[in-house]
Amino acid sequence: MPGKKLVLLRFSALAALVLCWAGVVPAQAENNGDYAAANKPVTDKWAVVVGISKFANPSINLRYPAKDARDFYNYLISKGNFAPDHVRLLLDEEATRDRILDVLGDSWLPRVALPDDLVVIFISSHGSSSDSDICGVNYVVAHDTNPDKLFTTGIPMKALAETIKERVHSERVLVVLDTCHAGGASESKGLTRQANADAQALAQGTGQMVVCSSDKNQVSWEGKNMTNSVFTRNLIDAFQEKGETVPVAQVFDAVKEKVQEQVIRERGVVQTPVVETTRWSGRELVLGVQPTRPRRVPQEVAMLASAPVAVPAPQAARRPAQTAVQPPLNQLSVLPNNKSGSGASRSPRDAASASAQDFLRYHFKMVGERRFVDAWDDLGSKYRARFKGDMQAYIASVSRHKWLSYTASDSEFSILPQQGAYIRVRVRMNSLTGFNGYWIYSLSKVGGLWAIEDVAVG
């Protein structure tokens, strides 16, 4: 439509909070008198956390969504009583349109969450205003979304809500969104958020409760002296200060006051977080509640959720079928030492282009960031056999180590004589874990990919 231009709104940590509390459609609950169903204990807890600061189209890059997502993820696994392997974290290039929809509606949540579980979905990215689409549709902008082709490359807000409602089996779902305006001038990107989500409209679309970082006619701001949004930082701080047993409603009251005070002080304008509760019933949600019957992630589900999403390539660009096992999508990143100087994205597991040191740096990063499902993908069959193929046993073992850093310098690596088919690398661990000694990694090449077959002290 002539005269209309694209307006991008950033969904940042905890803007729209959609809570689905066991069978909560008030009229139905009242008619059936089934409030007991709405008050069942939380049996287990799952989460998907998405943050996108860097986009395939760099002109729409933002500053803090990835950090907002990382901070919220860290809160969930350190203070919120979420098991690390129960949380899927997608950042930047990992958060493509197909990957987000796959984890939400196919390979992950529909296969792990049961009706009495709690599910948290956090998306921190751009979003589009309805004026950006010829039919007035709002979209979530993924890493690979083309802002000029939202219909074919974006995630419609309504479709996102329907996917969660229809494909996630849990009756308690917390969806976390924050709309923010990227602006046309470069200095406004990542600084202000305008045209916030309509809490009432979202509640009607999802049938549950919604909290927004500001009123729909206000701006949501990022702090002048912090690397988060004002709302996100204050929300996480409030959860930490009040403890794991405090209901979300009480946390919200504290956050609302702190956000108003900070924005008035820094900007001289009003930002008021709002909550839509007219369709809520049952006990108040406690985000940090201890699950009563936590379960292990089935190994086949963990592997499926880590596998690359099959996206048909154009006919002219298709490659011959390959038999080698391909690395998960979220391992296709730029190597720490890009010796080619091309800047192209390559897999750090590709033995043809990545050195053993580069591969181990990547593995240390996965472990150091507690991305244990991704770290499990780096293991060969021999090393997995030590844990009887049980990823949970591996996570229990490796999570005991405290990592101080995962950026090992070249001087901390030394290549040892090859042992059979294995390439052995000795790594000094003092700066990495505080252990004053060496670990020896035995690496293999399987289908052209690096894999860790053994780790020993030496």
Image (tube, rainbow, N blue to C red):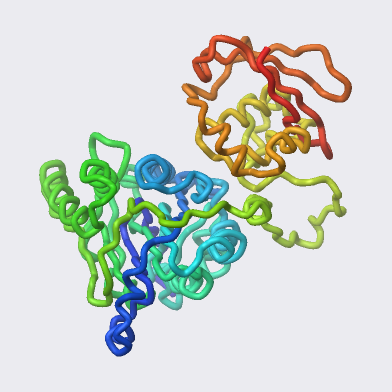
What is the x, y in percent for residue 33?
A: 29, 85
Q: Is residue 315 visible?
A: yes
Residue drawn at point x = 54 percent, y = 58 percent:
100
Residue drawn at point x = 78 percent, y = 31 percent:
351
Q: Quadrant of the N terminus?
A: bottom left
* 118, above or below 201, in the image: above
What is the x, y in percent for residue 75?
A: 36, 43
In the displayed structure, does residue 76 sit left or right of residue 373? left
* 403, above or below 410, in the image: below
Residue drawn at point x = 81 percent, y = 32 percent:
445
* 270, above or below 201, in the image: above
**Which of these two is toward me, 69 or 364?**
364
Rendering quarter of residue 158: bottom left
In the displayed structure, does residue 444 sit left or right of residue 208? right
Q: Quadrant of the C terminus?
A: top right
What is the x, y in percent for residue 274?
A: 20, 63
**Which of these two is toward me, 227 or 117?**
117
Rendering quarter of residue 387: top right
**Which of these two is toward me, 356 or 44?**
44
Residue drawn at point x = 23 percent, y = 76 percent:
278
* 166, above or below 242, in the image: below
The furthest residue to the bottom: 31
Number of marks in the rendered image = 0
Q: Is residue 222 visible?
A: no
Rendering quarter of residue 383: top right
